[in-house]
Amino acid sequence: QQTDSPTPHRSAVLQTSATFPLIWVGVLVTTYDSEIALPESTYTFGYNLLAYPWQTWLFGPWDLFIEHGHRRLGVLAGLLTIALVVSVWMSDRRPWVRGLSVFTLLLVIGQGLLGGARVLMDARQLAMIHGCTGPVFFAVCVAMAVVTSRLWRQSEVVDPNAQASRLHRLAAITALLSYGQLVLGATLRHVPVMASHGVFRASVLFHIVFAVVLLIHGVLLATNILRHHRGVRGLYGPSMLLVALLGFQMMLGAATWVVKYGWPYWMAEFQFAAVYTVQAKSMSQALIVTSHVATGSLILAMSVLLAVRSVRLVRGNVAAVGSTAVLLEFA
């Protein structure tokens, strides 16, 4: 039931490529509180979103630039998603892939509605939900790119392996932990100003613990692939990239703390830490915080890629893997 047409995969890759900048700019919007720069959810000071004068957009206030840019990127992502659905329904006869494409379209519509509601209601809770659903959309886009790729279409089960069930389990848990860490990060990012110190400390503690657990699982997943599935095309490289992203994310997390809250008190004896002053909404703070949040989305996307590919490329004993065998029937 598969197709040799490259159009769905190209559409999925283009859509995924447009979604990551959308997430990046969306994080900037939250960092600068720029969602309140435009009071309307579907218009820009009375103008149609696409008809707003580009001179005012590009050379106007910074808040206007990133908020209007975020909305335009959202429109682009929506249009590319529609193109993806059309290409899949025209060229791919697999019912589950068609269903996944429709689900992707529903996600981007829902994300747009959440963004509009966030502007109109100016609600912190909606901002957090909007920030948690964006990476889900990005991850589903990555999954669409995987299942429409030539590697997926041309590969049968290339590595019957007794370690398959462990690989599938590690990949699935790593993906779930990646998303859980994103939710905890969004919770920490949107802790109310009036919240007690205990609530903030608990949010930080859970975020750090989850980060360590996620790092351990990422290393275990990469080690499993290195030891048992290194020859499987499409798994080794992404697993190494995942570990690199996790290490980079830990450094960004530490840097985020410094630019937002300063150096730890026990480093006060060092001159650079003693004289350091936190500059709210400075360019360095915005870049580091945005990089930290956006890298979290990349980690989720890479985890999902490995989880989906592992089901396709590695299979153990049918009786042992159970539901995995059922999933393979849909390939």
Image (cartoon, rainbow, N blue to C red):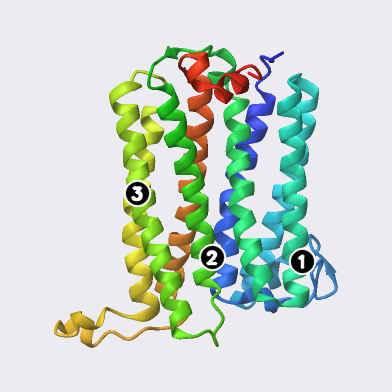
Which circle marks residue 116 in the picture?
A: 1
Q: Are marks 1 and 3 in contact (CB under 8 Å)?
A: no
Name the amino acid type tagged 1: Gly
Work out how far the residue at label 3 is from the one at label 2, CA to CA, in angstroms: 19 Å
Q: Secondary structure at mark 3?
A: helix
Q: Is residue 330 left or right of residue 43?
A: left
Which percent across, then down, holds residue 39?
Answer: 77, 78
Q: Secondary structure at mark 1?
A: helix
For disc 3, the marked residue is: 215
Considering only order in the chain, which callout, 1 or 2, is on the residue closer to the N terminus? 1
Q: Nearer the viewer, mark 1 or mark 3?
A: 3
- Classify 10 Å Cα crowding around label 3: few (below 14), some (14-19), many (20 and above): many
Q: Are marks 3 and 2 in contact (CB under 8 Å)?
A: no
163 in relation to 292, above or below = above
Q: Looking at the rendering, in which quadrant would you find the N terminus?
A: top right
44 in relation to 106, above or below = below
- Classify 10 Å Cα crowding around label 1: few (below 14), some (14-19), many (20 and above): many
